[in-house]
Image (cartoon, rainbow, N blue to C red):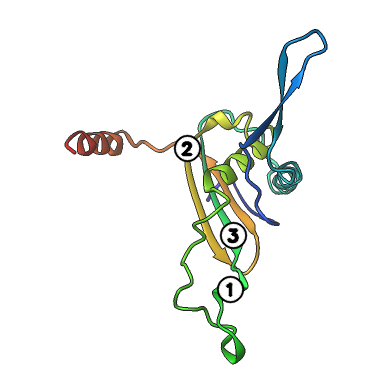
Amino acid sequence: MPLSQFFVPGKPQPAGSKKAFPYKKSEGGWGASVVDANPNQKSWQARVSSVAMDSYDGELIEGPVLLQLIFLMERPKSHFRTGKYSHLLKDSAPVAPHGKPDVLKLGRAVEDALSGVIYHDDSQVTTEFLMKRYWNRFGVIIRVDLDDTQDEEYVRQQFEESEHH
C-alpha cells in the first residue's frame, strides 16, 4: 500500500520550458527576462498541491521517494468514427497520446507541485514511473511511496547487458 495515492482532475500542464526576452539595462548593456512558456502551469501546480494536501496527512518524507504518475488525456473527436458508430474508435486511432505535451515536462510540473507538500524537494525522487494514456477525462493519478527497493542486482544485470552491446 503506497503512502499516498490520489487523482487530480484537470488538463495536465507541462513545466520546464522557458522563454527569454532580451532587454536593455538602464546602465547600459543587455539583460534577459526569463518566464515560463506555459501560462497555465502555475494554476495546474496549485491544483496538484491542493489535492495532495487534502489527500496526504503525514510528515514530509525525508528519504528517497518512488513516484508513479499516470497522465490521462481525453481522446480527440477525430479518433472516433461518425454517425451511428461515433462511439467506436477508428482503426487508425493511436493507442497512446504520443504528441505534445512531453511526458517528462508533465512529470516535472507534478514533481515541483509535490515539493514541500509530500516531500521536501523533488531531488528526493529516485525512482519514477511516467505514463501518458487516453482516458475519458483529463487528470493525473499520483502514487507516492518510499523508495526502499534493494535493486543492486538489477542495476548490475542492466549494466552488464549494456556493456556487451
The amino acid type, in three-letter code, at marker 3 is Leu
Q: Residues within 10 Å of mark 1 (few under 14, many from 20)?
A: few
The amino acid type, in three-letter code, at marker 1 is Ser
Q: Distance of mark 1 from mark 3, alpha carbons?
A: 17 Å
Is residue 3 visible from the viewing direction of this image? no
Labelled disc at residue 116 = none
Q: Which residue is at a point 68% across and 44% down the rendered structure image?
A: 56
105 and 48: which is toward the camera = 105
The amino acid type, in three-letter code, at marker 2 is Asp
Give the mark toward the camera: 1 or 3. Answer: 1
Q: Quadrant of residue 160?
A: top left
Q: Is residue 149 above or below residue 136?
A: above
121 and 1: which is toward the camera = 121
In the structure shown, which secondary structural element does the residue marked by tag 2 occupy?
Answer: loop
Q: Is residue 7 above or below residue 109?
A: below
Is residue 19 visible from the viewing direction of this image? yes
Q: Which residue is mark 3?
A: 72
x then y, percent, for residue 71: 57, 55
Q: In the rendered view, does 153 fall on the left or right side of 24? A: left
x then y, percent, for residue 126: 47, 34
Q: Distance of mark 1 from mark 2, alpha carbons?
A: 41 Å
Q: Which residue is at a point 58% across and 73% down the rendered structure image?
A: 78
Specify the farthest residue to the left: 164
Q: Which residue is at a point 58% across and 32% down the rendered structure image?
A: 122
Q: Which residue is mark 2?
A: 147
